[in-house]
Image (cartoon, rainbow, N blue to C red):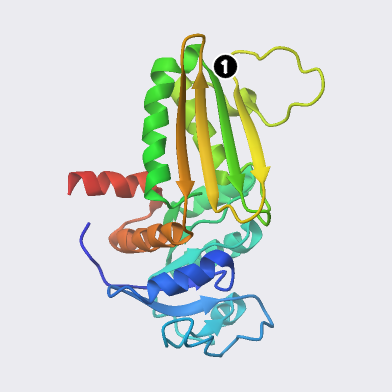
């Protein structure tokens, strides 16, 4: 993938991922941070936020409301959004009206909200991924392959662990893993997924995917997909050891989508382009 100069806005700029995105962005030579979006009435609006923390770079904080009112010029190509579903949809609407691209890392969308995003992708380029780690996206290909060979005769479980402050469960990544397996097996995900077990639930049924969720401490993200049958067991694991892996992936996505036409993309599109380059 060739380096391309692009300019971005970071939404959710003072969240965990937002701060990491700012740090990673200002290290890059081919990407420029124009604005950092934060909530209304935040104390950092129109201020330089902790120069030492951000490598002596001045960061201009503003709000979506001010951008909508055209109080600022819009000299950027793409918005990277790690916020909340309702906020993301507002930003998607803004991007459609102003012909901007968007990278979405927010999770926890309802099916109706996802339909809104898909509809918007018919007008602008959108790259959506619950997880921007290259490793987890390689895991998608691995479990797809295993599912087709062993899925029919295996008990399939997905176990995910995250820090205590994560608000959605199961994680968007875990759900995506389950959907990939369901698609490979030609199952209907809503019927194959088991999100709760309590009391006398009976023996395990076939063609089901069990989900287990752990919330503790500061775990950045760990996912395990287990395929177990009568004779053998396969576990596919991925552990994120630093949050910057997601920020680096999102920045890579912003550079990749720079010259793309309208459509709904994901990280696998980027990986495929790397393989053929």
Secondary structure type for disc 1:
loop
Q: Is residue 77 visible?
A: yes
Residue at left 61%, top 56%?
218
User: Where is 240 relative to 35, above or below?
Assistant: above
Q: Residue 146's image quarter?
A: top left
Task: Say if residue 124 shows up in the picture.
Answer: no
Q: Is residue 230 left or right of residue 28?
A: right
Of 97 and 270, the residue lying toward us: 270
- The residue wearing badge 1 is 207
Residue at the limit of the structure toward the bottom, as seen here: 47
Image point (77%, 18%), residue name: 201
Camera-nearest residue between 19 and 191: 19
Of the 4 image quadrants, the one containing the N terminus is bottom left
Q: How crowded is mark 1: few (under 14 residues within 10 Å), some or many (20 or more)?
A: some
Q: Position of residue 145 (x, y in %)?
A: 37, 25
4 over 67 or under it: above or below: above
């Amino acid at each position: 993938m060739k380096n391309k100069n692009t300019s971005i806005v970071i939404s959710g700029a003072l969240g965990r991922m937002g701060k990491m995105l700012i740090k990673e962005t200002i290290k890059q030579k081919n990407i420029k941070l124009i604005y950092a979006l934060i909530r209304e009435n935040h104390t950092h609006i129109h201020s330089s936020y902790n120069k030492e923390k951000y490598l002596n770079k001045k960061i201009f904080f503003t709000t979506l409301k001010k951008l909508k009112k055209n109080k600022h010029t819009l000299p950027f190509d793409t918005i990277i959004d790690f916020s909340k579903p309702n906020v993301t949809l507002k930003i998607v609407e803004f991007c459609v009206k102003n012909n901007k691209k968007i990278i979405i890392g927010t999770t926890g969308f309802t099916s109706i909200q996802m339909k809104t995003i898909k509809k918007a992708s018919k007008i602008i380029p959108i790259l959506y991924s619950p997880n921007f780690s290259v490793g987890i996206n390689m895991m998608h290909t691995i479990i797809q392959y295993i599912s087709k060979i062993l899925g029919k005769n295996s008990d399939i479980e997905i176990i995910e662990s995250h820090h205590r402050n994560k608000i959605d469960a199961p994680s968007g990544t875990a759900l995506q893993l389950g959907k990939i397996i369901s698609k490979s097996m030609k199952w209907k995900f809503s019927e194959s997924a088991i999100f709760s077990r309590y009391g006398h639930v009976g023996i395990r049924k076939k063609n089901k995917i069990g989900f287990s969720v752990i919330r503790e401490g500061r775990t950045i993200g760990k996912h395990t997909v287990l395929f177990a049958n009568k004779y053998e067991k396969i576990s596919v694991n991925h552990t994120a050891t630093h949050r910057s892996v997601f920020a680096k992936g999102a920045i890579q996505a912003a550079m990749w989508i720079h010259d793309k036409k309208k459509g709904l993309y994901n990280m696998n599109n980027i990986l495929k382009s790397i393989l053929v380059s």
